[in-house]
Amino acid sequence: MRMFQISPDSLGLFSFKHDDPLKDSEGLRHHAGAFMKTLGEAISYVSDADVMRMKLSDLAVRHASYGVDVTDLDHVGRCLIYTMEKTLPRREYNP
């Protein structure tokens, strides 16, 4: 939900953009789960930069076809950092 507070226009990129209330959207829940799964996969490749680069490059190409641009990715990064700051104990996350 933070993503749509930071960048309300980004909601238009998603299939669940008309779901009301958004916080109860099955589409949003599914996408959030897919995002977390992909994030976990990316982290699992951290020791193999070539594989991680290939996987993330494929993901970027796919998302570019949906109309996602670099600015949108910046918003995603900001939301991820915000979430980590709010949910992880300070000793586990220290930017």
Image (cartoon, rainbow, N blue to C red):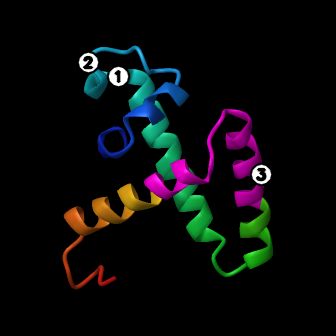
Left or right of 46, for residue 93:
left
- Within-10-Å neighbours for mark 2: few <14, some 14–19, many 20+: few
> Is residue 52 one of those drawn in magenta?
no
Q: Amino acid at mark 3?
A: Asp
Q: Amino acid at mark 1?
A: Ser
For marks 3 and 2, the one nearer the N-term is 2
At mark 3, the secondary structure is helix
Q: Which residue is mark 3?
A: 58
Q: Amino acid at mark 2?
A: Pro
Please identify the quadrant where the C terminus is shown: bottom left
For the residues bearing labels 2 and 1, Cβ distance under 8 angstroms: yes
Residue that appears at 30% across and 66% down: 84
Secondary structure mainly formed by the magenta segment: helix
- Using the image, tell me which numbered label, if any, was put on residue 25: 1
**Nearest the eye: 10 or 91:** 10
Q: Which residue is mark 2?
A: 21
- 78 vs 31: above or below: below
> Is residue 64 one of those drawn in magenta?
yes
Residue that appears at 37% across and 34% down: 8
Q: Which residues are magenta?
A: 55-76
Left or right of 28, for residue 82:
left
